[in-house]
Each structure stands twice: as C-alpha cells, then as structure tokens.
Image (cartoon, rainbow, N blue to C red):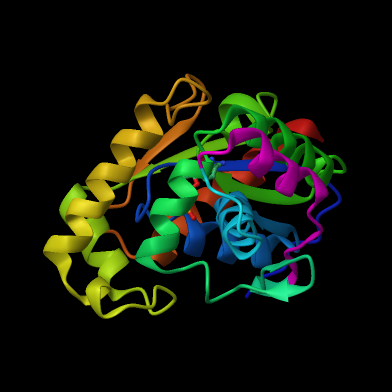
Amino acid sequence: MLHWPFVARLVIAVDGPSGAGKGTVARTAARALGYRHVDTGAMYRAVAWRALDRGVALDALDAVAAVAAAAAFDLADGVVRIDGHDVTHAIRTPEMDRAATLVARNPAVRDVLVARQRTLGAGGGVVMEGRDIGTVVFPQADVKIYLDASPEERARRRAADPAHTSSRTSDVAHVAEDLAARDKSDSTRSVAPLIRAADAIYIDTTGLPIADVVEQVLELVRDKAAAKG
Ligand code: DC
C-alpha cells in the first residue's frame, strides 16, 4: 500500500451508521497515510464491557461514567484493551451491541470519552471513526466523511463480519432488526445524535468496492493536504 511522503498531520473524521463501511475504510486509509486509526465505537463498547465486568448496572449513569473516567484504554494495532483486559473479541457480540448503545446514551460517559478522543487526536495524523467525530469531537476536522449504505447492505455486511461473533449474526433478518433499533437509538438520543455534519462529504457505499471508497477518501485528504501547503 502506498505511503505518501506526508508532512501534513491532518485530522480525518469518519462518521456514519453501523455497517456503512467505516471500520474498513478508516483502518485502510489510516494505514495508507501512516496515520493512527481510532475506533471510538470500540471505546463505548469497552466501557460497557468493563461496567458489566465490575457488576455495575448500565442504567446507573454516574457509576458507569466513573468506570469510564477510571479506565485505561489501549487501542493499538486493532487490539482493544481496557484496564489491561484484551476485549477485542468480547465486545463484538449482539449483547455488547445493545450494551454499548445504552452506554453511548449516557451524557456523562460521552463527556469522558470525548475528552479522551480529543487528546488522542490532538497532534493530528489520525483517522477517527464514530458517530459524532465531525460534529462534536472535532468540529474543525480537516476532512469530514459521512459514510452510508442501504439498510439491506448494512445488515448483510454486519452479518458477514467475522469480527462479530454469534450464531445470531449469521441471520440477516435478525441483524437488520438489531441494526434498525440501534440506528434509531443512535440518531434520536438527546446527546450527540448521529447526524451528518453540514460540511461532511457524503459517500453512499452501497454496491461500491471498499477499495474505491478508500481511494475517494485518500483523494480528499490529498487535496486538503495540498491546499494546506
Ligand atoms: O460503531 P459501533 O457499533 O462499534 O459503536 C458502538 C455504539 O456506540 C453504537 O451504539 C454507536 C455508539 N457510538 C457513539 O455513540 N459515538 C461514537 N463516536 C461511536 C460509537
């Protein structure tokens, strides 16, 4: 993969619903640019996992926020660790999908994680993916991408995703139901709902090879880097 001789250390925000291709696109683009990839959804998932691990009920808002505030995250190289526990696989189950969606509605947790995410991206040279990166975490991001795909395609991709472990995930109809419920929660919650930033570039990835989407993103980054000098 091409590594550009980059001096620019830009902040690239990639937002959109589950199954839109954010993970693959953000990871591949970050690798091509020599940038850091930060999956913020994994942080919400890890907090949910750690709260349950410590016997904290997910509706105990302050207690869950305390878990987040005390947590040590390690997100290097596609491995997700929280407080020393490798949760890379444990956080990708339908149960953790639902638990993370609950945790992501907790305003106090969001305050904690948004602050961590700003620190992670402070020096630039980062591709950060999530739901509120271009709207809340980095409203001044150099490049903002909003990825989307049809509900059917998103459900198909999620069902085929080997990172998601469960017999249920092979059942596209169930996955579609779960996705619809989580999308509704993510886009109607009162804090940092999933919305497209007015200045985000919208890419509908339905039927597109991921490599084409990555190429579009890299082109946008190249243009921005050239404009910045
Ligand atoms: O992208 P994901 O499915 O791993 O995200 C897990 C949950 O966290 C999902 O309900 C969306 C939510 N989330 C969020 O609210 N804000 C983010 N920046 C990232 C994820």
Give how far across and how far down residue 129 sits, in percent.
57, 48
Query: Toward the viewer: 85 or 27?
Result: 85
Q: Residue at x 78, y 65 (%)?
A: 83
> Horizontally, is 108 left or right of 196 in the view?
right
Query: In this picture, is 56 found above or below 103?
Result: below
Q: Residue at x 52, y 46 (%)?
A: 58
The quadrant of the picture occupied by the C terminus is: top right
Give how far across and how far down residue 138 sits, in percent.
69, 30
Give how far across and how far down residue 179 sits, in percent.
27, 51
Q: Quadrant of residue 144?
A: top right
The answer to whether residue 26 is seen in the rendering is yes
> Horizontally, is 152 left or right of 134 in the view?
left
Query: Toward the viewer: 161 or 56?
Result: 56
Q: Residue at x 66, y 51 (%)?
A: 127
> Horizontally, is 68 left or right of 124 in the view?
left
Query: In this picture, is 13 found above or below 52?
Result: above
- Indicate yes or no whether the magenta region holds residue 68: yes
Task: State how many labels appear.
Answer: 0
Query: In this picture, is 221 found above or below 137?
Result: below
> Horizontally, is 147 left or right of 90 in the view?
left
Residue numbers of the magenta segment = 59-76
State whether the magenta stretch is mostly helix, strand or loop. Answer: helix
The quadrant of the picture occupied by the N terminus is: bottom right
